[in-house]
Image: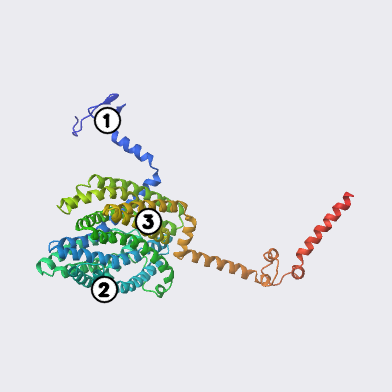
Amino acid sequence: MDGSGHSHVKYSNGVREDLNVTVVNGDVTDKKQKSCARLRSCIPLVYRQELKQLVKLAGPVIISQMMVFMISFVSTVFCGHLGKIELASVALSIAVVNVTGVSIGSGLSLTCDTLISQTYGSGNLKRVGVILQRGVLILLMACFPCWAVLINTEPLLLAVQQSPEIASLSQLYVKVFMPALPASFMYQLQVRYLQNQGIIWPQVITGVIVNILNAVINYVFLFVLDLGVAGSAAANSISQYFLAGILFIYICGRGLHKATWSGWSLDCLQEWGPFIRLAIPSMLMLCLEWWMFEIGGFLSGVISETELAAQSIIYQMAVIAYMFPLGFSAAASVRVGNALGAGNVGQAQLSCKVTIVSSFTVGVFVGFSFTIARHVVGYIFTKELDIIERVGDVMLVFGFMHLPDAVAGVAGGALRGAGKQLIGALCNLVGYYCIGFPIGVSLMFAAKMGIVGLWTGLCICVLMQAIFFVTFLCKLDWNKASEEARVRAGVQLKEEKQTRRKRSESQSWTSPVIGSQNCDLNSAFHEPASGNRPQHRVERSKNEEEHSQNLLPIQLKSEAVEKFTVMFHMK
């Protein structure tokens, strides 16, 4: 040992088993580092770099979406301490709000996954602000039909044979929540606005703050002020305004809007047709899938309370599990849209491949974990053994289902980035309502398999969807998708205008010749710029004009003369 406190060690050639390292000529190489280096060498560098960018996007998205989900989840937990009727009413109310309100706004905001991502990638930043303004107006107008349905919640629930007391409390909850619907829509739009620019962490920070406030408000309203179900709805409404308001203040305070916002413009009143043509398929792509799981809850309630309770637990776990592919789906739409807007087709294909492979890997891990823990998951929510056993039966099916569901979800994100929402909407319509739902209902009631049959039908559906989406992306004309993206971003139009301007300038330079009909273009482009052209060229041009229509007969005649001459010489 020297004075610095470090001991000098001399190694001989060979292997030191006690240190678990390989020693060759005095060089010590850790076996674990070797194995990691060998693993990294199996993955190309571009794939590793792309995976790193995707994780940077997907990780915060998973957290932010989890924070949004926790707001309604916390409200349900607090109301569970009020009584069974209150718990059932709040759970049913949240389902109604999600189906007829939140899902609509979330689906319409998915249009930004195409328009904003592609426009931002093209570099036409000020157009991003115009798209945001257009989205604000359209989403605010979408609140009115949603309100028309929500205000009639009680009659609708009574029509589907729900308890009058539960229907009345559900109507109370929905009426208190209705004013918060615009705030929920605006928050979703702000999230898409930031997310498609690669800005993720403000949503995470906002979600954490609001979840803390939501828990405090729920406690005060339910246990201090004793407001019951109305207090839970009020807490949820206030939390929605906190979400939208705090995120808006954060955007303005940090100046995140300066690069893309140039103030309100009348341009936002134009091009509503292209926006809506993307918005409706985007909404259907999300809602058709969302509504199917909500319908499953209603159908399970027809069988028994045990089936309904088990379905509710499985649905909550399915939402939590889907957060992982949801994050990669958002990352896929951002990366693919940005690349197509920039005209980088190779990057778009690379992002699509890496996200699908990543979702497959994560799906295997999550599905395997749920399969192993299928008999334990139920204890998180209840102590009823029959419910826990039923949850375990369904979790075995869900473990296999999650893998294709993850792949289909991420492939759907790539479709949104490429502007192919209509394909996704049609696939969801056919898959869920023409294949999965009929099979699931048949197994559920005719085969008497209960909710196991329902989830089996959904498993078949998502498996077919995953195969179709991946096949479609493999066959997609990415060059054409890039051209369409640049047209949406306004870049292609600018380039066409510049090309037309250059052509008009070149035509004006040769206008004395080109202005005449049936002119010789080859001679026209060789004319001098001056109007004082040589007289013999003008006469030649006039002669060519007079004989242009007789050009074909002259050619035929000359060919006949040539043939006759050849025959004459042969003779």
How dense is the environment of label 3, judged by Cα within 10 Å: few (below 14), some, or many (20 and up)? some
> Disc 2 residue type?
Asn
Residue on which disc 2 sits: 152
**Left or right side of 170 for 488:** right
> Disc 3 residue type?
Ile
Q: Which circle, 1 or 2, is nearer the viewer?
A: 2
Whether pointer 3 and pointer 2 mark residues with C-beta atoms closer than 8 Å, the reply is no
Q: How far separated are the C-alphas under marks 1 and 2? A: 72 Å
Q: Is residue 329 above or below residue 152?
A: above
Residue on which disc 1 sits: 21
Q: How far separated are the C-alphas under marks 3 and 1? A: 57 Å
**Left or right side of 544 for 476:** left
Residue at the image position 40 percent from the left and 43 percent from the top: 44
| Residue 562 screen position, x and y as percent | 83, 56
Q: Which circle, 3 or 2, is nearer the viewer?
A: 3
| Residue 507 screen position, x and y as percent | 62, 69
Which label is found at residue 435? 3
Of pointers 3 and 2, the one earlier in the residue sequence? 2
Of pointers 3 and 1, the one earlier in the residue sequence? 1
Indicate the secondary structure of the residue bearing disc 2: loop
Q: Quadrant of residue 158?
A: bottom left
